[in-house]
Amino acid sequence: MKVTVNGTAHDVDADAAETLLHLLRERLGLTGTKNACEQGECGSCVVLLDGTPVCSCLVLAGQADGCEVTTIEGVAGPDGQLHPVQQAFIDAGAIQCGFCTPGLVLTVVDLLGHTAAPTDDEVREALAGNLCRCTGYQQVLDAVRLAASPTSGP
Amino acid sequence: MFHQPRSLADALDARAAHPSAVPVAGGTDVLVGVNFGRTRLSSVLDLTRVPELRGHDVGPDDVRVGAGVTYTDLIAALADDLPALAMAARTVGSPPIRNRGTIGGNLGSASPAGDCHPPLLAAGATVETASVRGGRSVPAREFFVGPKRNVLAPDELITAVRIPRISGPQVFTKVGPRNAMVIAVCSFALSLDPARHRVGTGMGSVGPVPLQASGAEHFLEDHLEDSSRWRSREPLGPEVVERFAELVVGTARPIDDVRGTAAYRRHALRVLARRSLVWCWDDYRGGGA
């Protein structure tokens, strides 16, 4: 199968029952996408599949054949400059252990891509599938507000 | 083997030729079983590339929703035409789950807790299936035959759901420990159809299959008919609401499990039935349809 991850085309053999998460982490070595609940509850494995947030633990690798995948490794600029959402997470103190951060960042990148100035309710709804067990969600909400503010930007 | 047909004809051929291949749409149910070692997936029939399963048609009398339509699509495209089903879709999982999970997958999994099922039962929907032998239409109330079992033959696929459009109020209600990522502890759907003088119900997680409260439907239909209330839109007496809820609960066959006890489910279902009827009737009185 062929899959483009963060702009790079890959030609890989995947097992029929292999998940996209497994393909990313174990075959392509992209371990920024995290493996936690394996049942779509936690959002640690969220990636963008053709621009749509999905739980990569619940997508078969073969279902991504011919698709474009964006993982956390593909969010920063080519020169390594952090994406405004990543910078906002740092500035707002929205990261503690960091395990949930890749999924949260991709979810927020998607949210702000289609809703430039989301209400708090819209943010909470968009993040309903991303669990954080250390900092709590207040700083995450702060980070989204910061990233969405007009003064924030690359 | 990973079969990825690009047309319905190819999908049906593959289904007939490889009956052990597990049909997978969004994967949000099947893959949980695989990840936890409950389902062995040696062969897959991926349905996400079959164009005939996508899209919907809004007709004058009903809406035909392709089996591959996701919850996200349902919410975005059909909230006006199918409000109860759209509300059920909103309560499924979280955004990334709703981006993948499909109405056809919900029916294929046939969980007694499946959120689409109560509104489909309440609306009198039919499930369209196909195989190399031809197609058939199965009323939703005959579709579920046991916990996670449906009437599909080994060579059949679900192609679409046909849902009658109802001019009156309709709601979906659900009880769970939080507002997202919740499998229903119990759920209830109600529709009032003033054009046909019909009451429709559906309930989830209170029996081995999604159930319809026929006795409660008939009671309310008779009451509305005998008291000319479809026309007068007068308030319903509290004893009518109570009797309706009692008949709903009487039809339920809940069990104790990890998500709740049978006693709690009966209690919660009674509350949902009562509220749903009050909300729908208030809506109808307010001039809706």
Image (cartoon, coloured by chain):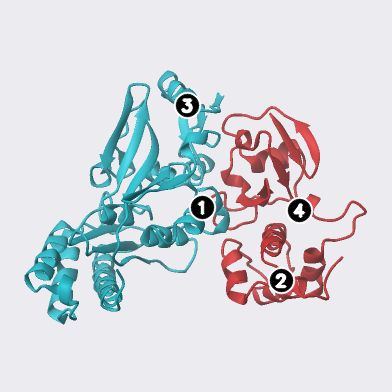
How far apart marks 1 and 4 lie (CA) works out to: 26 Å
Q: Which mark is residue B11?
A: 3
* View extreme (front): residue: B60
Mark 2 closeness class: few <14, some 14–19, many ≥20 residues within 10 Å: many
Give the labeled residue for mark 4.
Answer: A72
How far across and down, in percent of the image, does residue A11 sit?
Answer: 75, 29
Instruction: Please name the amino acid that badge 1 sits on.
Output: Asp
How far across and down, in percent of the image, does residue B95 sit?
Answer: 56, 58
Labels 2 and 4 share a subunit: yes
* View extreme (left): residue: B226
N-terminal of the pair, mark 2 or mark 4, is 4
Read off the chain for label 2: A
Mark 3 closeness class: few <14, some 14–19, many ≥20 residues within 10 Å: many
How far apart marks 2 and 1 lie (CA) works out to: 25 Å
Q: Nearer the viewer, mark 1 or mark 4?
A: 1
Which chain is tinted cyan? Answer: B
Along the line of sight, the residue nearer the viewer: A6 or B56: B56
How far apart marks 3 and 1 lie (CA) works out to: 22 Å
Q: Nearer the viewer, mark 3 or mark 2?
A: 3
Is residue A102 shown to the viewer in this render? yes
Side of A76 where B181 appears, left or right: left
SS at badge 3: helix
Which chain is tinted red? Answer: A
